[in-house]
Image (cartoon, helix red, strand yellow):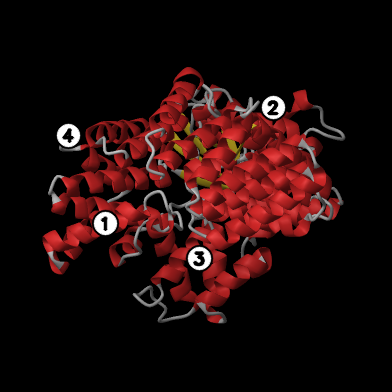
Amino acid sequence: MWLVEVAALEDDKFLVQTVADVLGVRDHSGRPPMVVLTEFLEDKELLLVLDNCEHLVDACAMLVSDMLRAAPGLRVLATSRQVLRSGGEALLEVPPLPVPQAERPVTAQLVARNAAVRLFAERAAVARPGFRVDAGNRAAVVRVCRRLEGIPLAIELTAVRVRALSLDQILERLESCYFELLAEGSRAAVPRVRTLRAAIASSFELCSEQERTVWLRASVFTGAFDLGAAEEVCADTGIAGEDVLELVAGLVDKSVLVRTDGSVARFRMLEAIRQFGEQGLASSGRQSVVRLRHRDYYARLAEVAEREWVGPNELVWFAWFRRERANLRTALEFCLTELGQARAGLAIAASLWSYWCISGWFSEARHWLESALNLERESSPARAKALWVNGLFAFMQGDSAAGWSMERECQALARRLGDEHSFAYAKRLSGTAAFVRLDFPRSLALFEDALTGLADRAAIWIILLQMSATPSIAGEDRAAAFGEQCLNLVNNRGGPMSKSWALWVHGLGRWTAGHRQLADRLIREALRTGRPLDDQWGTAHCLEILAWNAAAERNAERAARLLGAASRLWQATGTSPAELPHIAPDHALYGRRIQQALGNEARTTHFSEGAKLTSEQAIAYALSHEA
């Protein structure tokens, strides 16, 4: 094997001669160096490594092609941030070093096996003799490696900083001055790869003018994005939408963008590359314009997603919501930080209400809604809708004081505006508020009034869900009719998510009406239907009701485990069942019965067993022992 350090060459004038020198080829005849080299190689069998070819990619591609034609026994391994596109080229992408996953406990065994942590430890020990990764600092070392995304050069440059900074200080500076922290490199290295910024800047120089522009504009994305998003956001002055595909492909070839696996191609930048682009975009004076295009793109899709709820495509849009959560956050953050954009933030956050709901991300939804409501005080139907959504989530979390405050403001706003949409939002929220106050006749009347003339399937769905529980708590057995109505709606037009909720709410209504076997079947069907969705709030309700049923059947151990499993999910959604009027009475009643049946110690043991289950394990346990 022979290694040729291409990085040391500033241009291609001496590329052939450099390869010849490494191979020990000497010729004094005055013939062209390429002729001499190919004659030498033609009967040889060897591996030639060309390292760091990207700045001379065209010359290297021609050299490799000529050598391979002349020498059948030659094999070439070329490292480059850009593909050579030489005949017979087989690509092998070299990803960054793997870093410990965030959800895994940081154990001694984990860090000992991890390549990124080992590299940091080795370089840090050289910079500061005696440094080692131990129980006191391994969590911080792992956070550093995660922040650097496993990029070897970044890890090496950061590890040197342990001479002067603690790990916590390094982490803080990685957030505030990323490139400045990584500015000290090896003096022996080629200047263009001496620091991380220099290495990225050299890649930037290798791009065409249009590729550089797409790089800068794509830096507004957070996480991954698809081609459609790139075409909408990156196409603007100087770049047509139909040209974005080839420009994105060029950036993939140059290792600026990384394609992620999946049924639809998505692309992402390593954070260091994205930050470089972000700084360049800010310097260009076009950052706000591009961020506005990004915001508008996701605002349009959020509107479509809302219309698709309780429809055959709701699962597709739910997957989109989960996949694009980071970009939606970025769009919302733009609305809250850019002057005059808060109303658009209200619209985006409120239009996603059903997806926040199914995901159980009530606290995040309320954060965006409350922030936008505080910034955008002007009276409008958009504000009325945001007050309804925010109030609904406040009540769902048991924060009744905040919910009632939203209800009062929504009512007053509807009276000032006088439009039918604002009155509709006010009626829905007032119905929920009456429900929480245990004024069930008023709650039911308000919901029935809100349904009059309503054509929005998603709004009808959420109102019917609430009505399915309201009369059953009021001691009336009208819940069955509303539950059946809701099921008919989702069976005819909906998908698995809206159906799962219709099933468990109908099951709750049947339980409170005393039809326990029917309730049990409905709840189990709801769990099976919603199993792939990771619906924490809905699953918590299902586990809760099955726990009551188990307690009623004198299976207290199983009931305690189910309550334990439900408690973990309640906590994850920021909700306490004791604050929810539709389940609080039975939650307290069967909690006491379980305690009486098992005693404190046994009840705590079985409850803790359930609380340790993952969502999937809890569902599997709940669906076992079919009734």
Residue sitting at x 42%, y 35%:
501
Residue 110, image x and y in percent?
32, 60
Q: CA distance from mark 4 to mark 2?
A: 55 Å
User: Relative to residue 490, is residue 12 depicted above or below?
Assistant: below
Q: Are dots 2 and 1 in contact, CB under 8 Å?
A: no
Number of the front mark, 4 or 1:
1
Q: Secondary structure at mark 4?
A: loop
Image coordinates for residue 242, horizontal then vertical, percent: 76, 23
Labels 4 and 3: the sequence-earlier one: 3
The quadrant the N terminus occupies is: top left
Which class describes the residues within 10 Å of circle 3: few (<14), some (14-19), or many (20+)?
A: many
Q: Nearer the viewer, residue 114 or 68?
A: 114
Q: Is residue 472 visible?
A: yes
What amino acid does circle 1 point to? Answer: Leu
The residue that label 1 is drawn on is 589
Q: Residues within 10 Å of mark 1 (few under 14, many from 20)?
A: few
> Does residue 118 sit above or below 302 in this rendering?
below
Per the image, label 2 sits on a secondary structure element best described as helix
Gap between marks 2 and 1 measured at Cα: 61 Å
| Number of numbered discs | 4
Q: Earlier in the sequence, mark 2 or mark 3?
A: 3
Marks 4 and 1, how far apart at CA: 22 Å
The C terminus is located in which quarter?
Answer: top left
**Residue at label 4?**
627
Q: Upstream in the sequence, badge 3 or badge 1?
A: 3
User: What residue lies at 43% left-to-right and 39% top-to-bottom?
Assistant: 471
Mark 4 / mark 1, whichever is N-terminal:
1
- Mark closest to the chain's N terminus, 2 or 1: 2
